[in-house]
Image (cartoon, coloured by chain):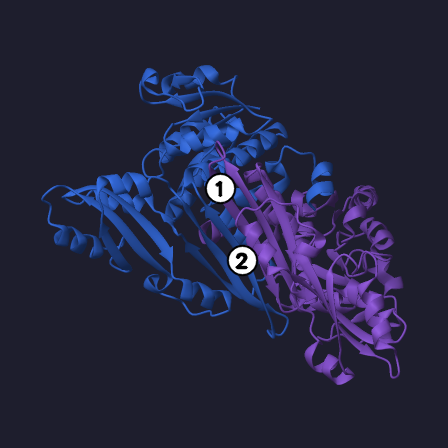
Chain colours: A blue, B purple
Amino acid sequence: MKVAIYGYGNLGRGVEAAVNCADDMELVGIFTRRAPETVKSVLGTKVFSADDILNFKDKVDVLIICGGSATDLPTMTPALAKNFNVVDSFDTHARIGEHFEKVDAAAKEGKKVAVISVGWDPGMFSIARIYSYCIMPNGKSNTFWGRGVSQGHSDAIRRIDGVLDARQYTVPIEETLNKVRNGDTTDFTARQMHKRECYVVAKEGADKDKIAKEIKEMPNYFADYDTSVTFISEEEMKKNHASLPHGGFVIRTGSTGNGDNRHTIEYSLKLDSNPEFTGSVLVAFARAAVKLNNKGEAGCKTAFDIAPAELSPLTADELRHTML
Amino acid sequence: MKVAIYGYGNLGRGVEAAVNCADDMELVGIFTRRAPETVKSVLGTKVFSADDILNFKDKVDVLIICGGSATDLPTMTPALAKNFNVVDSFDTHARIGEHFEKVDAAAKEGKKVAVISVGWDPGMFSIARIYSYCIMPNGKSNTFWGRGVSQGHSDAIRRIDGVLDARQYTVPIEETLNKVRNGDTTDFTARQMHKRECYVVAKEGADKDKIAKEIKEMPNYFADYDTSVTFISEEEMKKNHASLPHGGFVIRTGSTGNGDNRHTIEYSLKLDSNPEFTGSVLVAFARAAVKLNNKGEAGCKTAFDIAPAELSPLTADELRHTML
């Protein structure tokens, strides 16, 4: 299976590492919109210009698109799905419907399979939500994120005047997590479910009180949460906050029968590296895209539309013997 | 969707309760090998003789077979799959390959869909194992069961001379569970992973020491575990051990990239009623069997071969908007 990576940031590097671990895959190249000679691949993969991608139409079985959801993927994925089987990690929940329609039309036109919105949320957490809902319709699902670094929230802090660098950790509130686990079906507020811890490097002479106030009062991002702001040095940021851990919990509680019997279904992830794990999920779904296209399928799919066996390099018989 | 139940014990009652909660399903009847007039349905479902099942060939969209794996399902499922879409919970792991082949041939002959080995293990736990393996190939999976009642182990105790009734709880060893969660990849022994708690009602005048010794030394069932035996009265058995709770944990730990970044994927169930929860899983896969057969598919499938969306009564668009 010949795989290529389109876009080479943290996620692209995670995908590169994951393809390298897959015995049934070969990495053809990395495609970048930057000048290729300025991009150094971690594992020595060849780097090409994104402009040359169509020359690889017959040399690539699946293209893993590692762009951002805000501006890259809405145009990239539909454009590329006309000529390649593709996978992306589009994660703007509110716009998935729109993205799906555009990608579906393009993939059908090109007779390709496009898998969108895979990673861990959307992705593995979506899978946890759909299965637990289907097998226990009488119940309530809750998703908690963290403890982990939110890139979006970190970026929001960095845009504040006087801020040199910032890292924001989303932290689930343990007490609420345990209430949910034990069947409490209250509609908890944002503040009851998560808190936000911010580590900030201020520019020399910056007004730290003003920065902290601006963070804590920022609408949508921080105002609805208990937010702590800790100022640290550049050295401490490099030493203690360089990695990108994340994770979370999908918990569904509910009942069967006349309601007397209660059940808890829980799926959780604890990840040292968000981009490496997300990259690994993308690679598994890239395999599925190729397998489905080889069976004659075309169009856009999400994790909901793909049978688990399609993600595996093992045969159906091997899977039944080893994992069922 | 017209559903029927074939076999009416604990599991059959669990399926009856679950179908009753599904708005898109109608329960046509319960089929029993006993005299139908001797079987009282919990929810007032009509009871028919198993001998009449072929008269319902065009009145039933899917048949949920609630027999035992030891002697019932190996013959029942292939026989019924020729004429009906069927679902079973065949759970003898070592014989699934053989069962699959027989059911596949029958279902293909009848142009029906047969889903075998669904419940929570095999079933939901198998799904947890395959996804976590596919997205993190460098790692190790462990499954823990309990705390919960094992019917097989309870039955084994009941067969001992002098035993009136018995209930056996399988209990995961918390210390090992936490080691596994934290990435320990030791091949733990059976004794290190689970212990067995037995509650026994002895017949009057029975030799309790002899019974306890016989239990603890029973090969395969108890000899390889730390086993406790507690003698209780019939009243206490009825009062404190009437329900059938179960559950467990599927944990995969591993790494991505150069191995520096470690991750833990965990799926767990905590169930008040094993048969009601298993019944609910069977009902969701029964829906999938009908949907797939309506699309023209035929043959035997396991949980690995079925996309999550097929289990749901919602449309693909509704699922993307509410659960992705």
Chain of the residue that carries numbered disc 1 in the rendered image? B
Residue A129 at least partly seen: no
Drawn side of residue B96 relative to residue A162, left or right: right
Chain of the residue that carries numbered disc 2 in the rendered image? A
Residue at image mark 2: A266
Numbered label attached to residue B110: none
Q: Residue at x 77, y 65 (%)?
A: B151
Drawn side of residue B37 relative to residue A112, left or right: right
- In this orientation, which residue lies closer to the viewer: A40 or B296? A40
Residue A293 at least partly seen: yes
Q: Quadrant of residue A131?
A: bottom right
Classify 10 Å Cα crowding around label 1: few (below 14), some (14-19), many (20 and above): many
Helix, strand or loop at mark 1: strand
Q: Amino acid at mark 2?
A: Glu
Q: Quadrant of residue B236?
A: bottom right
Q: Residue at x 42, y 30 (%)?
A: A13
- Count of residue discs: 2
How far from the left and from the top, in percent, is residue B38?
A: 86, 76
How far from the left and from the top, in percent, is residue B55?
A: 85, 60
Residue, far left? A205
- In this orientation, which residue lies closer to the viewer: B299 or A234? A234
Q: Amino acid at mark 1?
A: Arg
Helix, strand or loop at mark 2: strand
- In this orientation, which residue lies closer to the viewer: B193 or B142? B193
Q: Residue at x 44, y 39 (%)?
A: A101
Q: Are marks 1 and 2 in contact (CB under 8 Å)?
A: no
Residue at image mark 1: B262
